[in-house]
Image (cartoon, rainbow, N blue to C red):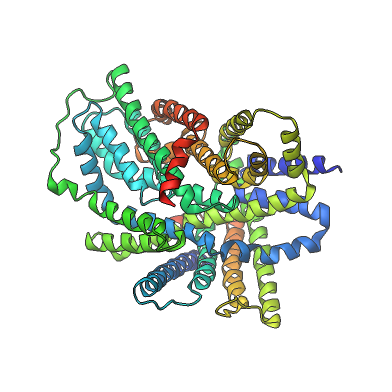
Amino acid sequence: MSPLQLALMIFGIMLLLMVVRMPIAGAMFLAGTTGFILQTGAQPFLNFLNNLAFARLANYDLSVIPMFILMGHFATQGGISKALFQFAAAVMGRFKGGLAMGAVLACGAFGAICGSSVATAATITGVALPEMKRHGYSGRLATGTLAAGGTLGILIPPSVPLVIYAILAEQNIAKLFAAAMMPGLIAMMGYMIAIAIYVRLVPGQAPDQEEREPLTLESLSGILPIACIFFIVFGGIYAGFFTPTEGAAVGAASTFLAALLKRELSWKKFLHCFHATALSSGMIFMIFMGADVMNAALARTQVPAQLAEMVVAMNFAPLLVVAGILLLYVVLGAVMDELSMLLLTIPIFFPIIMKLDFGMTPEYTAIWFGIMVLMTVGFGMLAPPVGLNVYVVNGMAKDVPLSESYKGVMPFLISDTIRTLLLLFFPGISLFLIKYLT
Amino acid sequence: MFSNFLAHIARLCSILGGLLMTGLMLMTCYSLISRNFFDTALIGDFELTGVGAGAAIALFMPLCQLKKENIIVDFFTSKCSSRVNEGLDRMGALLMAVIFALLSWRCGLAAINAKETLGASMLLGFPDWIVFTSMCIPFGITALIALMQALSSMDHLDEAAA
């Protein structure tokens, strides 16, 4: 069998297993196993397995992931979200569709201490959805807003997908976080603008007159714990007091403290944080191991390296290559979950990107590409047929059909597309903060 | 009965893993405070964080498998009957059992190997065999859970573990 046939066979097995409902992590693992053994025989593969779990799980750099996840769940269970949403609603209340904008603002603020889009969507939905319904917002706009707002959890640092990219591409996590800051804020603004336009174009989605909670000193306290934690974590990282992993530990500890001070964290909720952290971390690291096996098998065929050389030799315009990759991500994201997609494709695409000349230093190219990838991950969390965020929010809104929720995310997908193009053509938007912060 | 027992073990594992993460969190804070304010560094704290997180993540796997948290693509089979889907899910669980059994076996072997060769971390000399063992056991439990899911319906246990 030629290397190319072998590589295609490995992909074929993975897709076949995925189609018959095998967990994606397991599908990658088994496809990789088959490809590996066909090339080297069984013993080298078994030796490779000896160290697989040790290398991936007992890894200081990767321990930032479960730590940020734990922090996010402390925040979710700690009763921070309710006061936060009240504050955000009071700030945005003066505008038409203000409550929806408030939900976006709350998602963005919560995203500053939570690195997962699903957790952000679920947390803010829990407090914002009943309020939006009570005020007469349509199920379509309410669920669409909250699903889109949830992606701010990963667009605004900390961000689990960005950490994973940083590790795959061997880039500095702190610099990537700095580069994500502006795009994250632009995303938040873009979503608010999308709401403002949508409620004016499509009547009956939001109430014309809203009773408005005044912005008081008390409501201001809603944002206080989050602002403090964000300042401590990122201030500490950029001032050089601690590494991102240490920052995550400090963040988790201070979020825990904030929850304790709110007297919200019962023993039961505390254990729930552990369970929830176990579920998301276990899922992510299983994908890591599956992708490791698959990538090891693919790398042995030499096809990814040849593919990189071939693309470079074709002399396409560099921006065209990036655009092509991003489009491919949008298509792949329709059938795969975004993390598996990153873990599987970054080892193949990243060397290609690094061989192209974008007129930037290699480090800036790597960081900018990471931000572009992050944008498509956010897009994939919303886009049909499988937008994970839409599922989660829709699942919490019992009386809204899924198709309505998908209609609801459309304005936000348009906003996503515009932002992605903006960042594609103007890398400086995401890169300029790095110079100041690091 | 046995599957009920496994569900409780899975919960217990996740709590142990969570406590471990909390412990690492506190240790890191302590280390930071002593480093930045008292000029006394806790040597090798990052090594402990690495191996501790490794054990914690391995301890998270049983619950993850029990709750079927590993993402599947249900897009292609959404039109099939629930019996077909259930059959496919059992097949998937069986394959996951094979994967975790493999991982457990190899981690076990690596643990024995590391004990014989006295493998240890650089700064603290933390023995590698403990790390391998801390993964071997939870992986084994995960394999058993996946096997039970393949052989019998464990759905009613999801509520018990909720």
B142 or A43, nearer to the observer: A43
- Give the vertical position of A403 relative to B41 (above or below): above
Rendered image quadrant of residue B129: bottom right
A345 or A353, nearer to the observer: A353
Residue A129 visible in the snapshot: no
- Expressed as whole percent of the image width and height from the top left, the position of residue B57 reads 52, 63
Q: A87 left or right of B12?
A: left
- Expressed as whole percent of the image width and height from the top left, the position of residue A163 reads 50, 52
Q: How many marks?
A: 0
- Expressed as whole percent of the image width and height from the top left, the position of residue A324 reads 62, 30
- Give the vertical position of A115 relative to B139 (above or below): above
Q: A189 left or right of A303?
A: left
Looking at this view, name the residue that lies furthest to the right.
Answer: A1
B157 or B102, nearer to the observer: B102
- Expressed as whole percent of the image width and height from the top left, the position of residue A197 reads 32, 22
The residue at the point 64 percent across, 59 percent down is: B97
Residue B50 visible in the snapshot: yes
Q: B28 left or right of B61?
A: left
The residue at the point 66 percent across, 78 percent down is: B119
- Give the vertical position of B97 relative to A209 (above or below): below
- Give the vertical position of B150 relative to B44 (above or below): above
The residue at the point 53 percent across, 44 percent down is: A367
Rendered image quadrant of residue B74: top right
Q: A190 left or right of A388?
A: left
Quadrant where the N terminus of chain A lies?
Answer: top right
The residue at the point 14 percent across, 49 percent down is: A218
